[in-house]
Amino acid sequence: MGLEMNGQGEEEQTAFEIAVVIPKRNVKERDEECDCVEVLVDEFRKVGLIIDRVIGLHDEFIKLAAPLETLGRAAAKLQIKKRTHIGMDLQFEWDECEAFVRQPDGSLFSWCERFHCYHHIIYGIVNNSKSVITLNSDGKEFHWELRESLLRKLESVGIVKRVFPLHDEIKRKHLLRNWALNYKDLTKQPIDEIYSYFGTKIATYFAFLGMYTQWMFFPAVFGLTLQLIDFGSLQLLVLPIFFISMVSWAVLFFQFWKRKNSALLTRWQISYSVGADSGYKFLDMNRSSFQSPVELIKKWGNDKTKGKEIFQREEWFGRLTRFRNDAIVAFGIICLQLPFELAYAHLYEEVGSDLMKFGLTVAYLFAIQYFTKIGGKLSVSLIKYENNENTEYKANSLIYKVFGLYFMQSYIGVFYHALLHRNFKTLRQVLLQRLIVSEVLENLVENSLPYLKYSYKKYRAVRNKRKCEKGSSTGKIQLTSRVEKEYLKPTYSASIGEELEDGLFDDFLELALQFGMIMMFACAFPLAFSFAALNNITEIRTDALKLLSIFKRPVPRAAATIGAWLNIFQFLIVMSICTNCALLVCLYDQEGKWKLEPGLAAILIMEHVLLLIKFVFSHIVPEEPAWVRANRMKNATQAQDMCSKRLLRSISGGKKLFGEIKKNK
Amino acid sequence: MGLEMNGQGEEEQTAFEIAVVIPKRNVKERDEECDCVEVLVDEFRKVGLIIDRVIGLHDEFIKLAAPLETLGRAAAKLQIKKRTHIGMDLQFEWDECEAFVRQPDGSLFSWCERFHCYHHIIYGIVNNSKSVITLNSDGKEFHWELRESLLRKLESVGIVKRVFPLHDEIKRKHLLRNWALNYKDLTKQPIDEIYSYFGTKIATYFAFLGMYTQWMFFPAVFGLTLQLIDFGSLQLLVLPIFFISMVSWAVLFFQFWKRKNSALLTRWQISYSVGADSGYKFLDMNRSSFQSPVELIKKWGNDKTKGKEIFQREEWFGRLTRFRNDAIVAFGIICLQLPFELAYAHLYEEVGSDLMKFGLTVAYLFAIQYFTKIGGKLSVSLIKYENNENTEYKANSLIYKVFGLYFMQSYIGVFYHALLHRNFKTLRQVLLQRLIVSEVLENLVENSLPYLKYSYKKYRAVRNKRKCEKGSSTGKIQLTSRVEKEYLKPTYSASIGEELEDGLFDDFLELALQFGMIMMFACAFPLAFSFAALNNITEIRTDALKLLSIFKRPVPRAAATIGAWLNIFQFLIVMSICTNCALLVCLYDQEGKWKLEPGLAAILIMEHVLLLIKFVFSHIVPEEPAWVRANRMKNATQAQDMCSKRLLRSISGGKKLFGEIKKNK
């Protein structure tokens, strides 16, 4: 809370959205023409950016803002596709900007598009003169080669320490008041505002979290009832009913989530195609990421059948690489991690004294931290060889691989207690422990650790400053510039590495592990749903608070679905059907005879029926609401009606040309 | 074979593609101006059709052909969308016909489009004069009302007996030679020629049948090996391996079929969108079938949120109706059909004498024929209340419902023998019986019955003629006109009713039942695959022969996928995993102890692993080849690049207009 109050004095009307950090230099005699920072600032001005330079304690900050026209021209150069008033997505043109639909908050570009344009503008400053320019900084000299990006050069020689997006103080405070600190709303959130401030991916996460928590109320109440009321002899009948309703609940929830997701996409005017593998394929704005197919298309132009062959080879090669990588990871998990986890679970069961148990657990926790990191790094390096179409596909590939690791880590011990030892007391203890202790702790840690880090950094900065300026000044030294404070804030990054995923990975992972925990052992511990519901209500606000006041503003991502996580949740539902049936068998077959009696057979049949239900339900509830589809169809016909005749004329006119080109080839 | 030789003398160069059948009348004094047939012929001429009138023995035939321009203008009026050279689908315009891509066989319109245009032309002849026209026929008078379709009027008063598409003799003979009688090619077929002669739906069926048969070779050889070689003690190990490879084979086959299907669609220049429920949604050419959403859109224009509500209500109401109907059918099948089938199976097992068995079977066969018909009619009448988007959706809905009936009918008895009585000998006998006897018999019946019918009709026509003209002429009376012969040929219609499905229903049903039979009892009778392979090789040619020489030319359908059957095949795969596991349990647990021993547990685990494999495989093999996708993307970008700027200008120009319209509303 204290964080955002300080900055109130320096509220700006111009929204500076990007900051470039440069270490403070000892510039005595300014050689204006050659000093690299001055050149950089000049170039920024030339491309139409508004600049505000702030001198901090240790670093200098160049804050950048862009007038709409600058952004618009960059967007046109980037060939960004935007929704027009006729509902068709067309390449942006600055002169025709009237034709494009505005964002829900009234601005022309979304935050994601703006960031993309900023990136293009500032990294697009190249040496366009005819000779190499010599720049100097603190006496050191270096050459700005022809066609070289200035910012990249400065980054490589260490003059630009960092480029990061800035918080918008007005919007941030507004969100803080209406969202992060508005506990009364329970699961209600201003999703559109979150979208315009953080971009699609984060808004999708919060929309998912909100809906998930809302839906969680039903099983929470059901679970609580089961815990409080003693059904006596009916207990054995109640549990299967609970289990069946939980599975139906989960399946329906994800179908309705898909509907909500496509409704959100329509509201945010994002085009997407519902993918073949029942996940949404987002359109990547970055055209260069489609490089490899585009190049192949060029090759293809010459020879059709040969092109097809190249494509097919390329496709299968890619698939096999991905399959091989997945196999390596799966092999690693099964052959290395599984024995380790089982050994720990077994030792924990065998060891007598509590002290030993505690020591074992500490050692284990250290070990898995280390293992997870190795696994994450291995996965990232494996994925580098996969030719996934764009970074979001790569991120998904990483998620699948790393989730495998976490899945084993989180559940194998629990399975061990549940199925092999049939120790339901330990099982419930473990579940309770995990749900309460680990989730509450995790929430605390994930919020306080970055804050502590930030405080320490701030403290060190001030102390260092004091040391340096011991002699010269005696006044109080404080961090006064907001931008410097933000620079010291930690980045919203994933625990498994920053390359492909941001902090959303950890947030989704937490949700998925929780979902797995409560679903897979639903029959053993129905109360878990209530704990999860409580946890998620707080999770919404703490995650919001974290994003708004503890971290740097995250870099916006283009993806607008929960991506790989959807498949992981679906997988967990299927797993939960199997594990719960196994649990029921254990519960009803306490003597351990493993005889296939009518009761057991009934459970087996129930398992199959539930699996059937899962797939039937998935088919009954359509993924896309009818009005979304009708809207899209309406748009498509409108667009076609508008351009059909004109296009036809130009095609039949150009056909002779086409023909000639073909003949020449 | 004899059928098509007769017509050789009257081979025509102009392709007459539609025939209108009118009963021969006793026209003595011709009142040319008012005779309805003359008026009809005149009107046909006026709209630009070429006419050939043939007098048959009992009827008169008006054969119609259309010059390209007539078709083109009709297509433009119908707003048919066609692929252009830039890869985008645009509304057809006759003046710009150069812009549109031609069919693989060089014609501008596909057979389906042509038929659609013919239909529009001949049923589009309305009374455009200012007064009601009085027509007469054989002395009877009737009124041709304003704006009334002449052909519909004539059909309603019984003057036009039938309108049917005509075979094209040249192409038919070419296909007969290269396809139906070309037994040497085994599974190879000239799919593109079939497509241009019969349209997409039938070509898709044959492409599927060909690929299915081709893939069938592998399991056929495997099954034969299993039958011929005695593995001794390894037998128990070989069966599960066989089973696992069969499931993998089936899953892979259907994934590759989807790829092939999308490749075919690309080759035939048919646009489609890969649907949310992993089936292809075809674009219906008939715009009127989209009526209800289009109307809703109009309503929607006024109030956005209200429109959304209407849509959602409409959507859920439709879903619930469909669900209710499915539930009714399922209930009927389980509560009425299942006991009946079980009773038959039980009686068959109990009854001692062979004679009684035979009598029972005959009674049963009669009963099920009757039941199936009732079920089919019930389903059709239920579907009428569903608001499915177009006729192909309705057809799919019917297929699901009727397949349920056939599924019970075909397999319940077999399950009874296999699982309850564990009578593997009877099981194998039943399977062999069904596979050989019923399939061979069915093939014979389905080919000879229509031929006999046709022969009888021909014979009767000649005899009647002879009776009538006993006095007047004494010469030999023969059917000489090809068109009259075609008229007497039976229609290619489904056994369950003509309304929603054509004969393809029966052909697909046969394939699906065969697939279920061989897959679900794979472990009990591996040789079945070999029989199925042999059967399918002959099936290709007999089906081709049937279509080319026994039936009238079928009305082309727009759908270009195997539709509901794909889901049915997928369902059968999942079923087969479960049933085979149950069979293996029966095989290994001959004593009937039902104890969950390690072996049994292994089978259970295998079942789960196989179910997993099914879904993993479905994800690994993409439904759409990369080159198809790249092609589509290339087309999309090309189109967008061409029209982007122009469109933008017109939008931003028109925006003020849009705004004003919105304000006025």
Image (cartoon, coloured by chain):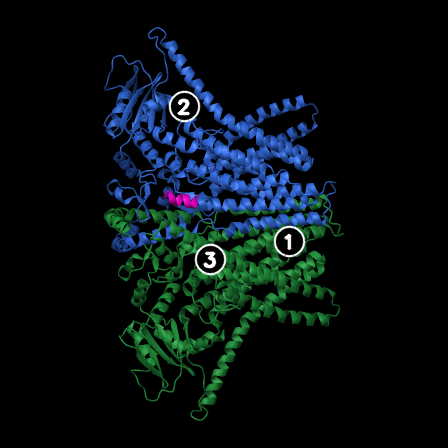
Chain colours: A green, B blue
The residue at 70%/48% (across/down) is B599
Q: Nearer the viewer, residue A647 or B610?
A: B610
Mark 1 lies on residue: A579
Q: Is residue A83 visible?
A: yes
Give yes or no for residue B575 being in the magenta stretch: no
Is label 3 in a helix, a strand or a loop?
Answer: loop
The residue at 64%/28% (across/down) is B344
Is label 1 in a helix, a strand or a loop?
Answer: helix
Q: Nearer the viewer, residue A429 or B525?
A: B525
Give the x, y percent position of residue B268.
Answer: 37, 42
Q: Nearer the viewer, residue A552 or B248?
A: B248
Residues flagged by tags 1 and 2 on a common chain = no
Three-letter amino acid code at the position of disc 2: Leu
Dot label at residue B127: none
Task: Please state if A372 lies on the left or on the right of B266 as rendered.
Answer: right
Three-letter amino acid code at the position of disc 1: Thr
The chain under label 1 reads: A
| Labels 2, 3: front one | 2
Task: Please state if B51 lies on the left or on the right of B251 as rendered.
Answer: left
Give the x, y percent position of residue A335.
Answer: 63, 61
In the rendered structure, which segment of residues is drawn in magenta?
B261-269
The residue at 27%/26% (across/down) is B51
Which SS does the magenta portion mostly show?
helix
Up/down of A317 relative to B152, above or below? below
Q: CA distance from mark 2 to mark 3?
A: 60 Å
The chain under label 3 reads: A
Mark 2 lies on residue: B3
Dot label at residue A561: 3
Give yes or no for residue B262 being in the magenta stretch: yes
Is label 2 in a helix, a strand or a loop?
Answer: helix
